[in-house]
Image (cartoon, grey):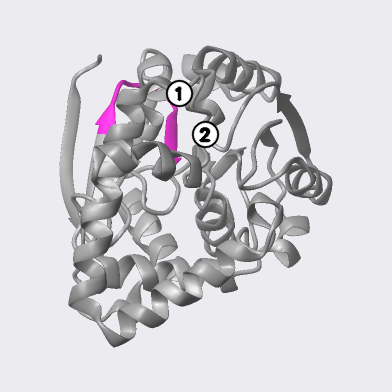
């Protein structure tokens, strides 16, 4: 793995954002899903940091970044502002942006604020509106969230304790993995364990506040405003954001291209990393982004 340059950036409201840079060349910025962590992109960073400069950052309230004092400040708009501030801090004027799952909402909001920063966008199992409405083909996940949120409002310490003990329990890892959208037959179990451990350690106040914002966000009206090339990577076995979501996303973009990945789950880039990496590399060459390496 190429050496890491890491650091912390103080955002507009004093929340500290942790980031890691690897490699040299045209910048590629990675935005993971809600409740996730850098490990979700370890296969992509290892592959692309040989030819590009890769940037990963932890959202506010996630992993090594701090949480705002008020959970109400856990918003998609503020995460987008964190990212913009970080790019300005690092002197990055233009980049490719890769968003997995909830990262799609983050990128839509960032593009709305600063379209000049974007060379292209890669959506991996992404969504731009409420994914919970028909997650797993049912409205039950939405109802479960309401129960969890209501219970936490009434008994925060108890629910926080139960959440950490349940999600972080190795015995429950297959269930957590299923709800997280992994293909248990393809994704390395180590990656699933890393995810569940990180999720169980999150500030639940911050997580629930952001999750609620995610459910209310609707980026569909802004898709037609995106002028840069976009690749939409869809897993054909993605039960979290089924194929029809991905097709609608690609069709709503002016320059959208859909890539359907057989056997891919909601974490297609962990299920079949070589396939996904080569597909993104092909996109970079087709759109001319790869050519900027020589400049």
Contact between labelled residues 2 and 1, with CB atoms less than 8 Å apart: yes
Residue pictured at 24% horizontal, 44% vertical: 169
Q: Which residues are magenta?
A: 21-30
Q: For the residue labelled by badge 1, is the local secondary structure a helix, a strand or a loop?
A: loop
> In the rendering, at what x and y percent does residue 251 appear?
84, 45
Residue 295 can be seen in this image: no
Residue 245 can be seen in this image: yes
| Residue at the spot of label 1 | 187
Q: State the residue lying farthest toward the front.
A: 171
Q: Is residue 271 left or right of residue 85?
A: right
Q: Nearer the viewer, residue 81 or 25?
A: 81
Q: Main secondary structure of the magenta part?
A: strand
Is 257 above or below relative to 274? below
- Of badges 1 and 2, the one in the foreground is 1
- Please rate how many residues cluster around mark 1, counting C-alpha atoms within 10 Å: few if below 14, some from 14 to 19, many from 20: many
> In the rendering, at what x and y percent does residue 188 appear?
39, 20
- Please rate how many residues cluster around mark 2, counting C-alpha atoms within 10 Å: few if below 14, some from 14 to 19, many from 20: many
Residue pictured at 68% horizontal, 42% vertical: 228
Task: Reply yes or no: does residue 27 show up in magenta.
Answer: yes
């Amino acid at each position: 793995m190429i050496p890491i340059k890491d650091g912390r950036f103080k955002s507009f409201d004093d929340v500290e954002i942790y980031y890691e840079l690897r490699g040299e060349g045209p910048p590629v910025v990675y935005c993971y899903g809600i409740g996730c962590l850098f490990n979700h992109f370890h296969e992509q960073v290892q592959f692309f940091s040989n030819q590009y400069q890769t940037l990963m950052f932890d959202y506010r309230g996630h992993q090594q970044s701090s949480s705002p004092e008020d959970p109400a400040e856990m918003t998609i708009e503020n995460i987008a502002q964190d990212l913009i501030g970080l790019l300005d801090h690092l002197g990055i004027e233009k980049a490719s942006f890769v968003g997995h799952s909830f990262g799609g909402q983050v990128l839509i909001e960032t593009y709305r604020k600063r379209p000049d920063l974007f060379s292209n966008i890669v959506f991996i199992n992404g969504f731009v509106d409420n994914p919970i409405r028909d997650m797993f083909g049912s409205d039950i996940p939405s109802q479960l969230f309401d129960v969890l949120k209501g219970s936490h409002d009434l008994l925060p310490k108890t629910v926080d304790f139960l959440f950490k003990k349940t999600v972080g329990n190795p015995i429950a890892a297959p269930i957590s993995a299923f709800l997280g959208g992994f293909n248990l037959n393809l994704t390395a179990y180590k990656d699933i364990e890393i995810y569940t451990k990180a999720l169980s350690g999150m500030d639940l106040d911050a997580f629930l506040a952001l999750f609620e914002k995610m459910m209310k966000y609707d980026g569909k009206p802004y898709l037609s405003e995106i002028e840069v090339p976009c690749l939409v990577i869809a897993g054909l076995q993605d039960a979290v954001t089924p194929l029809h979501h991905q097709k609608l996303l690609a069709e709503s973009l002016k320059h959208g291209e859909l890539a359907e990945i057989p056997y891919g789950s909601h974490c297609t880039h962990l299920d079949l990393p070589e396939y996904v990496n080569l597909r993104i590399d092909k996109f970079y060459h087709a759109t001319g982004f790869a050519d900027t390496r020589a400049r």
